[in-house]
Image (cartoon, rainbow, N blue to C red):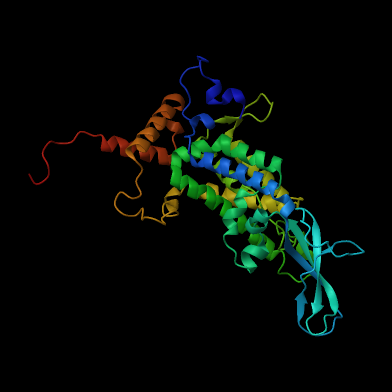
């Protein structure tokens, strides 16, 4: 979105009523969920960077001799550097994240060396929190479907994701409220991880000799240990949801002076990810997560009632009044809808907004002074 389209850039502009959709930090409460997500992601990235010198080896794959003697195999603790002339890594020396190391695989009975177990070095937080098909599915470490959403591969990766969240998150959060929006965002990220995992599983269950598997578009044939990190899946869900809530808003990309309708931008972005996934781009795994997050965002913004019980850990929102928003929140939502009608007309309202406005009108209708049964 162009700077001139931002609400805070139009103060004193004299261009008529302020728009109902304020996409940016001006519309966020100090402790909104969007703010929390941005702060947490930045803090985690800084901490990961600070701990790069305290790397942890994470398993990648094994290379075992095909003509080895029969017997039980074990992986020794001794680390070796990779390369043609492998040498033992110095003891008590910190490993730097990004390095590659390996450990010898030997026969338990004779200690005969029969292969290598390969590892990539990650900082401790990324090692514990990243998602992969191997860690999340084969080892059933399901928490990684949430934790990978708070990790990033580099500063550019982090900045782009947080920028998308900052631009579009406020609108979706105002519509859903703090708790539902938190559930929505995390569910989109989880669906992104699940689609990545499913495509990676199908890409690896076919026998290795079947070369035709590589010709099936969308399947991820890389190692099941390949890591997935980033908030992109959740951000894609938020962008798709924002396009549904504000279909007549325009987006200005970089310095292009022509505004693009928000739905075109959102669905075009998703279409690009689908193309990259099917064409087998270098970041096909990340594109799979983008598509999974977008699908979840498209569905759950239209069925947000399904998110109600996501955080029912300390209470039950299904109790009378437990799942209702506060009067202040309802009044703010009605004000937003009325402003939208004033600016864009009644035809611009979504089905959900029409129901909200209709419910408000019914609740404010005059009532008889006589109580039933009196």
The one of 189 and 361 positioned closer to us in this rendering: 189
Q: Quadrant of residue 269?
A: top right
Left or right of 143? Residue 275 is: right
Quadrant of the rendering where the N terminus is positioned: top right
Can residue 275 be seen at all in this image of the molecule?
A: yes
Q: Residue furthest right?
A: 85
**x, y percentage for residue 24?**
54, 31
Can residue 209 be seen at all in this image of the molecule?
A: no
State the residue at coordinates (62%, 42%): 42
Image: 12 above or below 58:
above
**x, y percentage for residue 110?**
83, 84
**x, y percentage for residue 371?**
12, 42
Q: Quadrant of residue 255?
A: top right
Q: Quadrant of residue 117?
A: bottom right
Image: 249 above or below 124:
above
Q: Residue furthest front?
A: 92
- State the count of labels: 0
State the residue at coordinates (45%, 52%): 307
The one of 311 and 193 positioned closer to us in this rendering: 311
Quadrant of the rendering where the C terminus is positioned: top left
**x, y percentage for residue 347?**
44, 32
State the residue at coordinates (63%, 68%): 139
Left or right of 14? Residue 366 is: left
């Amino acid at each position: 979105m162009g700077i001139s389209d931002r609400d805070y850039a139009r103060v004193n502009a004299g261009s008529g009523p302020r728009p109902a959709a304020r996409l940016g930090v001006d519309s966020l409460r100090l402790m909104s969920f969007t703010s929390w997500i941005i702060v947490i992601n930045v803090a985690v990235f800084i901490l990961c960077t600070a701990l790069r010198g305290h790397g942890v080896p994470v398993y990648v794959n094994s290379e075992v001799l095909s003509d080895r003697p029969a017997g039980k195999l074990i992986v020794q603790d001794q680390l070796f550097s990779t390369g043609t002339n492998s040498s033992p890594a110095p003891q008590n020396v910190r490993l730097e994240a990004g390095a590659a190391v390996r450990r010898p695989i030997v026969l338990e009975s004779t200690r005969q060396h029969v292969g290598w177990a390969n590892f990539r070095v990650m900082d401790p937080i990324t090692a514990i929190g990243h998602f992969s098909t191997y860690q999340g599915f084969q080892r059933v470490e399901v928490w990684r479907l949430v934790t990978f959403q708070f990790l990033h591969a580099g500063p550019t990766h982090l900045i782009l994701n947080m920028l998308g969240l900052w631009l579009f998150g406020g609108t979706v959060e105002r519509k859903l409220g703090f708790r539902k929006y938190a559930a929505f965002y995390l569910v989109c990220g989880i669906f992104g991880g699940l689609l990545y995992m499913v495509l990676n599983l199908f890409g690896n269950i076919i026998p290795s000799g079947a070369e035709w598997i590589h010709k099936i578009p969308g399947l991820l044939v890389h190692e099941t240990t390949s890591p997935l990190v980033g908030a992109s899946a959740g951000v894609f869900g938020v962008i798709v949801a924002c396009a549904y809530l504000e279909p007549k808003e325009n987006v200005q990309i970089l310095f292009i002076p022509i505004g693009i309708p928000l739905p075109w931008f959102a669905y075009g972005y998703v279409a690009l990810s689908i193309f990259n996934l099917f064409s087998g781009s270098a970041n096909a795994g990340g594109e799979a997560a983008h598509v999974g997050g977008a699908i979840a965002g498209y569905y759950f913004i239209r069925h947000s009632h399904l998110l109600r019980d996501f955080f029912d850990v300390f209470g039950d929102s299904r109790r009378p009044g437990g799942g209702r928003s506060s009067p202040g929140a309802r009044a703010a939502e009605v004000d937003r809808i009325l402003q939208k009608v004033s600016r864009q007309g009644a035809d611009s309202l979504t089905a959900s907004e029409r129901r909200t406005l209709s419910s408000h009108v019914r609740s404010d209708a005059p009532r008889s002074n006589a109580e039933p049964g009196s």
